[in-house]
Amino acid sequence: MVEPTLYTEICPRCEEGLLTSVTAPQDIPIEGSLVRINEVQMEECPLCGFRSLSGRDAGLYEILFASEYQGISELVQALKKAGYYGLFLREDQRETFIGFATREYVAALDEGVKGLYLDNESHHVLQGLARWEGGLVPIDLAGRRYTVRLPKIGEGENGIVYDYQESTEAVLKIAKPRPYSRHHLQEESEVTDFFEKQGVPVPRILLSDPYGSFMIKERLAGESLARLYNRLGGPENPQHQKVKEEVRRFISGLLELFVKHPEAKTSVSPNNIFVLIRGNECRCLLVDTGPAPFHDYSGFDFDHYWETVIPQKIKQYAAAGYL
């Protein structure tokens, strides 16, 4: 096991700025009373103003276990009864593995701490997986047992994607520990059918968490444009030209769709477009259908996107540990 490397995250809302850490007081309603925590870690984007509680502040939930807050003693007892020790790491008689609580348990939580619980839960699951450089790690998805194959196979602003041993035709996506990212996965689950009906190749959602913490998705063939781009050769290379024109056609179709259905607007980042090359055939697929309402495509220029934006994004992804 290794200590996870902490990278600077890219803002999930604008996908441009880098998140910084700030602290601020936070009032959390618990059983009808407000509990003020003076220094809560927040994530903030200096470009678009996005701000969110950070699930990385794992100590925040521990504060709520402090003896002076007797009003949540039932919550503490419920966690212990469920077999949790520390935070969100479960233990059975044979081995220790990482897990999400049952969703019935989450539904019964006080609304004031439910979101906080979910974000800290995701943080501990992702941190637990990040401690392994490779191999197989068992994980409990709200009562369903899966065996994650490490290392990760993909990462974006809102989630991390893993292979798992029980299926070669599907992947596991876990939301990053923030409300925005959980909501993004919830919406992704809701709008995927819309894109499929519009003829856009997308992965089907096979299982989705009602709180947006995780989902099981159909595995897509091909690889992300972000990974493929630097292997296409120069602009005169026939494969470079073929992929470029197919991506142009694909994005053009998406932008036309967004004009007709602005509520379906999603990201066209190179991390979100998969390219499948088979012989002379080349086609694109949309990996993440989660809405990106703050994106403005009114002045979109494909040549600028291809020649400038994609290389910049690749550098940004690499610096954030996504590639």
Image (cartoon, helix red, strand yellow):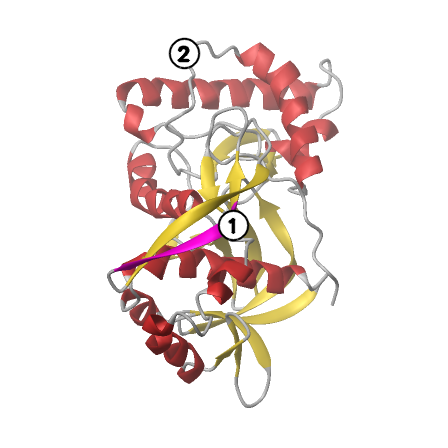
Name the residue carrying label 2.
Answer: 298
Q: Residue at x 34, y 22 (%)?
A: 258
In the image: residue 313, left or right of residue 54: right
Residue 234's disc number = none
The secondary element bearing badge 1 is classed as: strand
Location of residue 125 by image quarter: bottom right
Name the residue carrying label 1.
Answer: 39
Residues drawn in magenta: 33-41
Q: Earlier in the sequence, mark 2 or mark 1?
A: 1
Name the quarter where the N terminus is drawn.
Answer: bottom right
Mark 1 Cα shell of 10 Å, populated few (<14), some (14-19), many (≥20) = few
Residue 44 drawn at (x, y percent) = 52, 35
Residue 318 drawn at (x, y percent) = 70, 36
Is the residue 27 above or below the residue 22 in the image?
below
Is the residue 4 above or below the residue 183 in the image?
below
Mark 2 Cα shell of 10 Å, populated few (<14), some (14-19), many (≥20) = few
The secondary element bearing badge 2 is classed as: loop
Location of residue 240 by image quarter: top right
Q: Residue at x 40, y 25 (%)?
A: 294
Q: Farthest residue to the bottom: give it.
A: 93
**What distance separates the C-alpha of mark 2 from that of mark 1?**
40 Å
Please state which amino acid type lies under the numbered disc 2.
Answer: Ser
Name the quarter where the C terminus is drawn.
Answer: top right
Q: Residue at x 73, y 13 (%)?
A: 236
Q: Farthest residue to the left: give it.
A: 32
Looking at the image, can residue 177 be seen?
no
**Magenta stretch, overall SS:** strand
> Which of 182/87 is in front?
87
Q: Is residue 96 magenta?
A: no
Q: Nearer the viewer, mark 2 or mark 1?
A: 1
Residue 212 drawn at (x, y percent) = 38, 53
